Image (tube, rainbow, N blue to C red):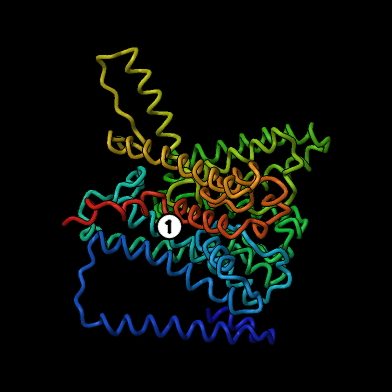
Amino acid sequence: MLIPMFFDLIHNNQDWKQFFYISSITFLIGLVLYVGFKKEKLKIDLRQAFLLTILSWFLIALFGSLPFIYSSASLSFTNAFFEAVSGITTTGATVVSDLEKLSEGILIWRSLLQWFGGIGIIVLAVAILPTLQIGGMQLLNMEHDDPYEKTLPKINKFIVEITILYISLTFLCFFFYYFFGMSGFDSLIHCMSTISTGGFSNHSQSFGYFNSHSLENISVLFMILGSLPFVIFIQFIHGQKMSIFKDDQIKLFLFLLVLIILITLIWLKNYLNIGWINALRLSSFNITSILTGTGYTSANYNNWGSFGIMIILMIMFIGGCAGSTTGGIKIFRFQILFRGVRLQIKKLTQPHAVFLMKFNKKTVTENTYTSIISFFFIYILLFLLSSIILSFLNIDFLTALSASASAISNVGPGIGEVVGPNGNYSDINDMGKWILAITMLFGRLEIFTILILFSKNFWKK
C-alpha cells in the first residue's frame, strides 16, 4: 500500500492518509503475528501450507478492500470486496462506472492487486496444486513424487526464479507500452494488468481508449506470454531451448488462438462489412483478450452478431495453459478429456489391446484422468448453479449466464448491456455481487482447493 500512497502524495491527493493508516494497521497485525510465532519452531506440513495459502487469498481480498472503502472512492463494503476479489483473482470485473474520477493511488492499487494475484496463482500452481493432485495439476513439469517436505527446497528455488521472470516481463511490457505512446502512468497500470492477464484499466473505455494498433499488438504479445506455463520459460532459460516448442498444451493453445482469430476474422469481415485489416485488428485483440482471460476490450462485441457473441461466450471457458496467470478450465484438461474419449473408442474396437494415454511424454494415470473429469463436472455444475442463483435474484438470463461464465473463468467483461464491454457490474444487486465474488474465488483457486477444506479425511493425520 506504500506504492499507491506515494502516488497520491506526489499528486497532492488526500487518499494517501488512508493508505498510510491501513498499511500501518496491516503491518502491525503482521508484526504481532511474526513476533508471537518467531520462537516457535514450526514445521509446516502440506495441510498447513494448504490452509495458509487459501486463507491468504481471502485475507488479502478482505484487507485489499479497505482502501476502496475509506478513500475518496467511497465504495460500500460489498462493492469494495467485489472489486478487491476481482483484482486478486485477476478477473478484472469492476463496479466503478467512471474510472477517470478515481485517484491515482486507487488506480495503482487495483492493478497491484491483479499483479500480486498473477504471481500468486503461478506459485499456487507450481507449489501446492500438483502435490494435492487437484484437477490433474500433477501433470505440471515439476516432479512431485516425493513428500511435500522433501520437494520444498526445489519449490522455493522455482518460486524465486519465476518471481524474477515475472518482474522482468512486467518491466519489459512497461517499456514497450511507454515507447509506443502510452503515458508513464498508463504504462504502469496496464503492464501490471497485462502480464497478470487481469485486465483492469484506468479508462472506462478499457484498451479502446488508446485506439492504437501498435499498443494492441504489444498487448496481444504479453497477454499470450502471461498465458503460457512459466515453468517452461524457466526451462528455456536453463538451456532446454526446445521445451517451449514441444509442450503439448502450448502447441494446442497457440493453434486454437490462431484458428479462432481466423474464424472470427472471416465472420466480422462479412457481418460488419469492414476491411480485412480492421477485421484482423478487432478479432486478434479481443479474441486474445477473452481467451487468455485478460478482459481488455477495444470494441463492443455485443454488435458482432449471434455467431460472434457465441464465440466470445465459448472461449471464456477455455483459458490458457496450466502454470500461467490465466483462469478457465485450461487447455491441458481439454486435451486429456479428448484423448480419453479417443482411447475409449480404441478400446471398443480392440478390447484386448493395452493403451496408455500420454501427455508431455508422461503417462496419464487413471486417477489423474478421473480427477480431471471430476474437475470438469464440478466446474460446469458451479457455473450453472451461479447462473441459476443470479436468475433467481431477478437478473436477466443473458447477464446471469455471461456474468457467471466470466466470474468462474476470471475473464472480467460478460455479454449484454449490463456486464458487457460497455458496461460494468455496478447494476448487479448486492447479493448477486457476493455470489459472483465467491464464484471468482472458486474459479481462481481451482474449486477443489476450497472444497477440500470441508473434507474430514483431509484433516486426518
Residue that carries the numbered disc 1 in the rendered image: 122
Taking 261 as reference, is 43 above or below it? below
Taking 423 as reference, is 379 above or below it? above
- The residue under the point 63% across, 69% down is 188
Number of numbered discs: 1
Q: Position of residue 117 (x, y in %)?
A: 48, 62
Report the front residue among 69 and 411: 69
Q: Quadrant of residue 339?
A: top left
Residue ranking furthest to the left: 461
Label 1 sits on a secondary structure element that is helix
Q: Quadrant of residue 274?
A: top right
- The residue under the point 63% across, 67% down is 189
- The residue under the point 55% across, 63% down is 82
Q: Amino acid at mark 1?
A: Ile
Label 1 crowding class (10 Å Cα cut-off): few <14, some 14-19, many 20+?
A: many
Residue 123 in the figure: left or right of residue 98: left
Report the front residue among 279 and 61: 61
Q: Position of residue 137 (x, y in %)?
A: 36, 46
Residue 271 in the figure: left or right of residue 223: right
Taking 38 as reference, is 356 above or below it? above
Q: Position of residue 221 (x, y in %)?
A: 61, 52
Q: Quadrant of the C terminus?
A: bottom left
Taking 212 as reference, is 44 above or below it? below
- The residue under the point 64% across, 51% down is 413
Q: Position of residue 206 (x, y in %)?
A: 70, 58
